[in-house]
């Protein structure tokens, strides 16, 4: 009788080594694919966020600059200021003005008094570094020191971005308010040629509305100061501030009234504004300049009364660095020197041009 012996044969050492090698190659390929997908995801996310923040920042600046001097039905320089706004916070150096200029504002008690620049409604254009009447005030290529000096509400803020403009705009909201906040400031027309600026708690009591007049609405007053500062940010979500992120912020007039900071778009590294000046009086910009003669004494430099439009530039940056990328591009805009970052951040320059309609209209009326 023959006996059959079944032998079990294993793999050889060579076969085992080949299998391990193949497995390792597959694992490396999967890890590489995962890493590339993760990098691509973060890159796309950073680029999308940079584009969104850049467009939003440009939109907000364009809206407030384009609407600067919009006071709704209040189209006359004859206006009254509620006595409750005496000593209200200002954000303009040396900006206190009195009621004894041409077309004076009148305190409700009909006595001359000092009011902050914020509440001087009717300008003759754009204010540079002088505390004249204006609806716009700008510091071109401001350093942290002179930004705080020109706009006192910025004093104490850390890491203000140098070589970016700072701009102060004044207007009312785009629609009248149906319900008034007693601690907010409102503008309203009273009668055919009289305006009032007062707290919501006193605006109707100070100067009552005319019965049946549909134009006597109450509009929330919205002065804003735009600037860029670097804010420590936890970009890795590990509870620690990893990086200073340049952010577009603005001071807004909150209930009180008091100015408070509102940061609206991360990754905004700088913004610059060029002003379109009409040198021949035809209503169109003949040239765009970054600096204006606010003193109205230098005939060689355009003055604020010639401003008809604004060209706005916003340089946006990704929030996170990409260690595999080096940005060697050169950015040139407005009057800033050519800028080549040579770092690991993506950037995009956004620009638009807006008409400064209300300032132009008031200039033509000699307000």
Image (cartoon, helix red, strand yellow):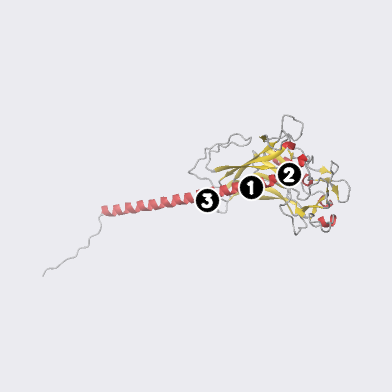
Q: Is residue 85 left or right of residue 245?
A: right
| Residue behind mark 3 | 45
Single out the residue that lies furthest toward the top. 300
Return the x and y of residue 252 as percentages of the image width and height. Answer: 71, 50
Question: What separation in Å lies between label 3 and label 2 (alpha carbons)?
Answer: 39 Å
Q: Nearer the viewer, mark 2 or mark 1?
A: 2
Q: Residue at x 89, y 47 (%)?
A: 111
Question: What separation in Å lies between label 3 and label 1 (alpha carbons)?
Answer: 21 Å
Q: Residues within 10 Å of mark 3 (few under 14, many from 20)?
A: few
Q: Residue at x 76, y 38 (%)?
A: 130
Residue 12 visible at all:
yes
Sequence-first disc among 2 and 1: 1
Looking at the rendering, which quadrant does residue 114 occupy? top right
Q: Nearer the viewer, mark 3 or mark 1?
A: 1
Return the x and y of residue 159 as percentages of the image width and height. Answer: 64, 43
Q: Quadrant of the N terminus?
A: bottom left
| Residue behind mark 1 | 59
Q: Residues within 10 Å of mark 2 (few under 14, many from 20)?
A: many
* Closer-to-camera residue (274/107): 274
Sequence-first disc among 3 and 2: 3
In this view, 130 is above or below 57: above
| Residue behind mark 2 | 358
Q: Quadrant of the C terminus?
A: top right
Label 2 with label 1: CB-CB less than 8 Å:
no
Q: Find numbered disc 2 in the image and state the secondary structure of the residue it sits on.
A: helix
């Amino acid at each position: 009788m023959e006996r059959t012996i079944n032998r079990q044969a294993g793999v050889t050492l060579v076969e085992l080594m080949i299998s391990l090698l193949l497995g390792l190659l597959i694992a490396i390929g999967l890890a590489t694919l995962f890493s590339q997908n993760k990098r691509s995801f973060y890159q796309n996310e950073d680029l999308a966020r940079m584009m969104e923040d850049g467009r939003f920042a440009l939109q907000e600046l364009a809206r407030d600059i384009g609407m600067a001097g919009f006071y709704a039905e209040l189209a006359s320089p004859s206006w009254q200021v509620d006595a409750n706004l005496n000593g209200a916070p200002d954000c303009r150096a040396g900006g206190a003005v009195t009621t004894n200029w041409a077309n004076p504002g009148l305190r409700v008690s009909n006595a001359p008094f000092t009011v902050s620049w914020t509440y001087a409604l009717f300008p003759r254009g754009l204010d540079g570094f002088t505390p004249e009447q204006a609806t716009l005030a700008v510091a071109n290529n401001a350093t942290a020191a002179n930004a705080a000096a020109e706009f006192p509400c910025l004093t104490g803020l850390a890491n203000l971005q140098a070589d970016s403009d700072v701009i102060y705009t004044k207007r009312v909201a785009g629609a009248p308010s149906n319900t008034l906040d007693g601690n907010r400031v409102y503008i309203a027309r009273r009668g055919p040629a009289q305006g009032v600026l007062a707290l919501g708690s006193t605006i109707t009591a100070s100067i009552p509305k005319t019965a049946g007049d549909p134009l006597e609405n109450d509009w929330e007053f919205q002065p804003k100061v735009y600037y860029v500062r670097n804010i420590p940010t936890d970009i890795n979500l590990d509870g620690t501030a990893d990086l200073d992120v340049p952010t577009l912020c603005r001071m807004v007039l909150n209930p009180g009234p008091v100015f408070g900071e509102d940061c609206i778009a991360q990754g905004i590294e700088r913004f610059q504004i060029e002003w379109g000046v009409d040198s021949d009086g035809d209503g169109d910009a003949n040239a765009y300049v970054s600096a204006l003669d606010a003193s109205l004494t230098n005939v060689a430099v355009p003055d604020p009364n010639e401003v008809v439009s604004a060209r706005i530039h916003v340089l946006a940056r990704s929030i996170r660095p990409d260690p595999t990328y080096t940005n060697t591009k050169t950015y040139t805009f407005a009057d800033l020197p050519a800028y080549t970052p040579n770092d690991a951040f993506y950037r995009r320059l956004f620009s638009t041009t807006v008409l400064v309609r209300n300032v132009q209209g008031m200039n033509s009326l000699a307000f």
